[in-house]
Every structure is written in C-alpha cells, then in structure tokens.
Image: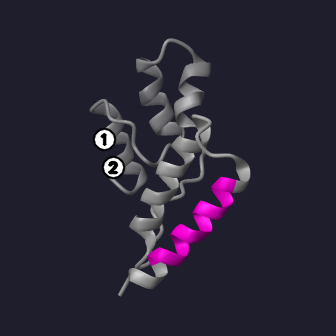
Amino acid sequence: MGGPEGAKVAAEAGVLPAMVDPGVKAVLAKAFPDAQSLEYFAEAKKSYPLLMTKYGSRIEAQVNTMIEEYLLGKLSDSEFDAKFRDGLKDIIATSN
C-alpha cells in the first residue's frame, strides 16, 4: 500500500490511500460528485505525527487538553503559556 500500485488497489477498494497520484485520482473520481470534492481529499498535505520522543505522548495529551480549554475560553493567553511551561517541566522531571 506504500507505492503507486498499492495505492491504486486501495482506491479501487474504496479506501483513501496515503499516496495519491494521477492514476489513483482517476479511480477516486468515480466516487466523488465533482472535481472540487476530489481535490479536497486528494491535495498534498503535510502530516505532523505524534512526537517521537520519550515525552511525546504525554506532551500531546497535555497540548490537546490545553487547546480545548483555550478554545472554550477557560484559559487566557498568559495562563496558557504558564500552564504549558509548567506542564513541560513536570513531564521532563517525571519521565525516565
């Protein structure tokens, strides 16, 4: 599934593959109502996966919680910054 051949097979099975080339787009086009919808799902995008360090999953959990609190208005800008810095210090101090 990592190459063009596998991506086309996945697309024919109704799965949106990670790699999209013109051949895959041609297969996927049959399932979309218009070219704009196809382009939305087939455009090139950068992916930022989980941080790959010993702190990664804990940092991601902290950030996700804090973003939610911030967007809900439960944290101001300065509170966000202070809580983030304190959380990072705690994660570093308590990780092996």
Percent position of residue 9, x then y: 31, 41
Q: Residue furthest left?
A: 13
Residue range (magenta): 79-91
Q: Amino acid at mark 2?
A: Gly
x 57%, y 70%: residue: 86
Element on which disc 2 rests: helix
Residue type, numbered disc 1: Val
Mark 2 and mark 1 in contact (Cβ < 8 Å)? yes
Give the crowd class for mark 1: few <14, some 14-19, many >=20 residues within 10 Å. some
> With 74 as the anchor, is 92 left or right in this view?
left
Horizontal and vertical percent for residue 82? Answer: 65, 63
The residue drawn where x is 69% and y is 46% is 76
Q: Is residue 80 magenta?
A: yes
Task: Give the number of the disc on residue 6.
Answer: 2
The image shows residue 63 at horizontal and vertical percentages of 52, 56
> Which is more toward the observer, 82 or 36?
82
Mark 2 Cα-neighbour bin, 10 Å: few <14, some 14–19, many ≥20: some
Residue 61 position by quadrant: bottom left
How does the figure colour the protein chain or chains? one colour
Find numbered disc 1 in the image and state the secondary structure of the residue it sits on.
Answer: helix
